[in-house]
Amino acid sequence: MTDQTANTATSTPVVSNFIRSRIDEDIANKTFCDAITTRFPPEPNGFLHFGHAKSICLNFGLAKDYAAQCPQSHCNLRFDDTNPTKEETKYVDAIREDVAWLGFDTRGQEFYASDYFGRLYHCAEQLIRAGLAYVDSQDSETLRATRGTLTEPGTPSPYRNRSIDENLDLFQRMRAGEFPDGAHILRAKIDMASPNLNLRDPAIYRIRHAHHHRTGDSWCIYPMYDFAHCVSDAIEGISHSLCTLEFADHRPLYDWFLEQLAKLGEFKRPLPQQIEFSRLNLTYVVLSKRKLIQLVSGGHVDGWNDPRLPTLKGARRRGFTPQGFKLFADRIGISKSDSLIDYHVLEDCMREDLNERAERRVAVLNPIQLILSNFPENHTEPCFAPNHPHHEELGKRELPLTRTLWIEREDFMIEPTKGFFRLTPGKEVRLRYGYIIKCTGYDTNESGEITCVYAEYDPTTKSGTPGSEARKVKGNIHWLSCAHSVPAEIRLYDRLFKTPNPGGRQAGDAPEQTRDFLDDLNPNAKHVQIGMLEPALAQCAREACYQFERIGYFVADQFDHKAGQPVFNRTVTLRDTWSKN
RNA sequence: UGGGCCGUCGCCAAGUUGGUUAAGGCACUGGGUUUUGAUCCCAGCAUACCUAGGUUCGAAUCCUAGCGGCCCAGCCA
């Protein structure tokens, strides 16, 4: 069933998915009436990437859509900061910035699992009092050895049946800092023989004499994810806790904690429910935190915001847009099947958004001189170009035409290949927004390189003048007056990897051969050159995005671009159905 | 061969309380418009739903048996 309700973020119709179905049922059952509440819970130990964008769009998008039926619906941005040894304030700041950039409504609020440390501690004590948790004093190796295997049950800890009073005393002393790291651990007492490893008396608190980026030194014991996450959800009144597939095995634990705590009167029903969906996989991209770190620390890219990186910081600098990501999220959908999305789907989403939004400008990236030999010297002829072909209201701007121009080197060929209909000796082509010209010759240097092209213009054919349409020419090339154009640094980016599955098995590989994803790095993913721009472009603001006509979408670099000293990054090329074949 | 999850067109993905010819998007192909080889518009594009049996008047949807893929043995999240 396709719901034709327009998604306000994009023009894509909202397509049903299994999560929406669940929510719809919950609304129909009156399990939840006033609010559908979700959360986006990043751990502040790294930068957000494309995969997070999918999750953000899902969680915030759901809250936004369901607000129509359940007006209090919202999504909490919650920092899952329960491991002080890995988390830092700089990541909190970066994540906040990225979420804001994507443009979702956080209602000016931020949530932190660390704000719940007191409540979490209390809940843990309640579990102990109920005989549902105990302090284990075995070391981590012993714990691992007694956990059993996938096919064999674990063996109970000798400390499993400590008295409630002893457990309470020990746990309080753990908190008081009486023990070194690793001396004790608080475990839930569930089932050492469970086929689900997560239920074999999982750890819920560990000792860490570490400084926390928010709570400082006030705690030396920290809750584990499985305990902290469900409790945080319950505290915030999350109705639907969405996470990726690998947490499916944790759901029984999630439910167990909440069920026990609800029975103990800590939480009211309905309890939050965890629902898993498949994570994003993209061709030509790596999204694992480990690999991303390797790329940055190994100097393979220029920092976390390198436009080649699939981080949100990199995407922003590359010129990818929040609307493009939302379109992408809608387009790929949500399901539980492992999927691998073609990278060009993402690129197409950016093209689609940019096509609508980006004004057109002229730039010549690989300039070669063109002289109009019958054009008067010292004459400047104003030509006018619309800022957007589909939006007349955006007006036009003047492009000065003179005798000496820059054109794209690729737009001229001495001996044209089959199907080439740009400039070639003896043939005609239109100077976009100007006149029809006919190529009369060219100069080459000693190495045979073309240095200058000559042409004559037909004064009766100026764009926009009566009769200019009389003669049709197929070729249409862009140009810039040498005297009026300004040079700019142009950074041409391409995909970071040259293979669809970086580091993965390839056709000719030997059976046991393993490859390093770094070997699949595309050495041509970044190319910096000087190009020429129409004057207005040099004055634009940072992060302004444009379509350079006939070339692609470009963005003024977020950091390096300055008025008068322009730096543009190529976001994505225009689709080119000609060069394909 | 412990447990959990998944398998519908090249890539995604609806549909799964069994009921006309299996949504939609992307890609692709053909045509039209076009002063961007762009955009835009129109048309085409799974007798088929991992396989094999079975139940039924009728199955992608139910049953059985297989096959294939992903995840789990951190005091990470």
Image (cartoon, rainbow, N blue to C red):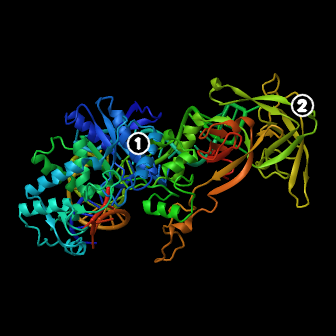
Percent x, y of residue A445: 90, 57
Residue that carries the numbered disc 2 in the rendered image? A379
Is A511 on the left or on the right of A157, as rendered?
right
Q: Would residue A224 appear left or right of A317 to someone viewing this image?
A: left
> How many numbered circles does the render carry?
2
* Residue picked out by circle 1: A57
The residue sitting at 52% across, 52% down in the picture is A343
Q: Please report the residue visible at 16 percent of the width from the left and 68 percent of the height from the top.
A: A136
Q: Position of residue A338 (x, y in %)?
A: 38, 56
Q: Residues within 10 Å of mark 1 (few under 14, many from 20)?
A: many
Q: Earlier in the sequence, mark 2 or mark 1?
A: 1
* Amino acid type at image mark 1: Cys
Residue B53: quadrant of the picture: bottom left
- Residue B21 lies left or right of residue A426; in this view the side is left
- Residue A223 visible to the viewer: no
Look at the numbered disc 2 and give the secondary structure of its residue: loop
Q: Chain of mark 1?
A: A
Instruction: Check the image and report above or below for A336 versus A376.
Output: below
